[in-house]
Amino acid sequence: DAMVIQNPRYQVTQFGKPVTLSCSQTLNHNVMYWYQQKSSQAPKLLFHYYDKDFNNEADTPDNFQSRRPNTSFCFLDIRSPGLGDAAMYLCATSRGSYNEQFFGPGTRLTVL
Amino acid sequence: GESVGLHLPTLSVQEGDNSIINCAYSNSASDYFIWYKQESGKGPQFIIDIRSNMDKRQGQRVTVLLNKTVKHLSLQIAATQPGDSAVYFCAETSGAGNMLTFGGGTRLMVKP
């Protein structure tokens, strides 16, 4: 089945220790997104790639970076995780604009 | 750790009853709307979408109503089942159509 895959599902890191979350898709969608979702809150868009074009949300901290080496993969790098970065990180994909976004299962990040 | 989130509004219904979940949006330029269902520990799952040139769209057991005059969106679930228990988010987009803005979410609890 075509899908959005996120690894790992659970990630524990230490305060200030860089961490990378990964997302892959078999849908061949050209747009990929990263969202942060905290407990009992709505997902909040961090950034997205439209093909190779990177689009950063204005309020996304510099601590968060992303890479998309090819159509299928997208990475979220957190350079120096703080306690406030503990959250569920969701990857999503879509076929262009004005189409539904397909979400992965998320990676739950714990910062010790 | 994770910051404490807001308590989600909760709708509690009896199995077999109809459910109505409401969402207000503020951007009058929003022209595409989606309802997502999110079960605990999972990513959001697409339920139904509607474009701003429509005021009603039906799916299987679900209906979305859009009132652009008052900027209101609703999701109706017919014959609610225990498997419908989840958090429901409305999302809107405008302009380039890539960036979804999520509403606050409503927790639906179905009593057997």
Image (cartoon, rainbow, N blue to C red):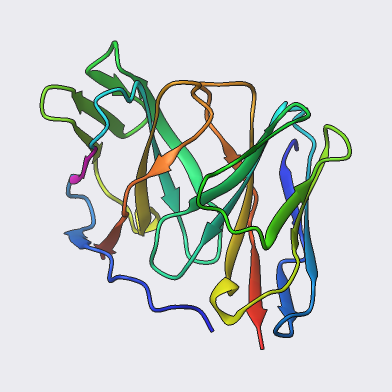
Q: In this rendering, would A112 be left or right of B51?
A: right
Asked if A18 appears above or below A53 in the picture, the reply is below
Outermost residue toward the top? Answer: B53
Q: How far across and down, in percent of the image, does residue A47 sit?
A: 61, 44
Which residues fall within the magenta stretch?
B19-25
The residue positioned 33% from the left and 25% from the top of the image is B30
Residue B56 lies in quadrant: top left
Q: In this rendering, would B12 be left or right of A33?
A: left
Q: In this rendering, would B32 be left or right of A54?
A: left
The N terminus of chain A sits in image quarter: top right
Q: How far across and down, in percent of the image, does residue B34 sit?
A: 39, 33
Outermost residue toward the right? Answer: A69
Residue B37 vs residue B14, the one in the foreground: B37
Q: In this rendering, would A106 be left or right of B90?
A: right
The residue positioned 58% from the left and 75% from the top of the image is A86
Please tell me how many numbered marks the rendered image carries.
Answer: 0
The C terminus of chain A sits in image quarter: bottom right
Q: How far across and down, in percent of the image, does residue B93 sit?
A: 41, 29
Asked if A99 appears above or below B87 in the picture, the reply is above
Magenta stretch: residue B82 in it?
A: no
Outermost residue toward the left? Answer: B70
Residue A93 vs residue A52, the one in the foreground: A52
Report the predominant secondary structure element of the magenta stretch: strand
The residue positioned 11% from the left and 22% from the top of the image is B69
Q: How far across and down, in percent of the image, does residue A90 sit?
A: 61, 54
